[in-house]
Amino acid sequence: CLHCGLVCNKCVDVCPNRANIALDTQGKIFKDRYQILHLDDPCNECGNCYTFCPFEGRPYKDKLTLFSSLKTFEESENNGAFFPDPDKADIRLRLRGETYLLDISQDRETEKSEEEYSDLEKVSWLFSLIFREYHYLLERRK
């Protein structure tokens, strides 16, 4: 990765199914501007992202996951979310084994530093960003 000091997108580049994507958070809330989102539906767990990760990570397990169905959400242990209705900003969110039902319609961003946000606030904000700016990811496959 030629920009390792700025962003590591190795797992995005090596995924044959494009199951990992880099979201531009525009420098808000997170220290690292680009956050990796794992898409559960296209992933076949080939292991490329794990093999090529320079940080010994497992992006298909470690990164937040966007689920396309309630069934896959419930069958997985990954941290992530499922939008029951892609046109509504309500999500089922799993974070560290706890499941939440959240309304993410309000942009709760304030002028706090990254350390002042709880993990739940950060993750909620990221899925709110997906709802607002990356809505195409919520389209269901027929």
Image (tube, rainbow, N blue to C red):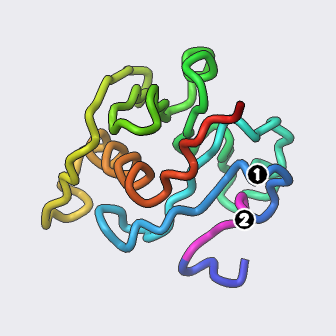
Discs 1, 2 touching: Cβ within 8 Å:
yes
Where is residue 76, by image quadrant? top right
Check the image and report above or below for 14 versus 105: below
Magenta span covers which residues?
Answer: 7-12
**Label 1 or label 2, whichever comes before in sequence order:** 2
Front-most of residues 57 and 49: 49
Check the image and report above or below for 125 versus 81: below
Task: Locate the N terminus by quadrant.
Answer: bottom right
Residue at the image point whose x is 25% and y is 44% from the top:
105
Residue 104 in picture, x, y percent from top left: 28, 41
- Residue with the most extreme left position: 111
Residue 103 in picture, x, y percent from top left: 26, 34
Left or right of 127, for residue 110: left
Which mark is drawn over residue 10? 2
Which SS class for mark 1? helix
Front-most of residues 85 and 44: 85
Residue on which disc 1 sits:
49
Which SS class for mark 2? helix
Residue at the image point whose x is 66% and y is 49% from the top:
57
Front-most of residues 106 and 125: 106
Front-most of residues 115 and 64: 64
Density class for disc 1 (Cα within 10 Å; few <14, some 14-19, many ≥20) is many
Residue 113 in picture, x, y percent from top left: 20, 65
- Residue with the most extreme bottom position: 2
Mark 2 is on which residue type? Lys
Residue 43 in picture, x, y percent from top left: 76, 39
Residue at the image point whose x is 65% and y is 58% from the top:
55
Check the image and report above or below for 20 versus 98: below
Mark 1 is on which residue type? Cys
Where is residue 63, by image quadrant? top right
Residue at the image point whose x is 23% and y is 57% from the top:
115
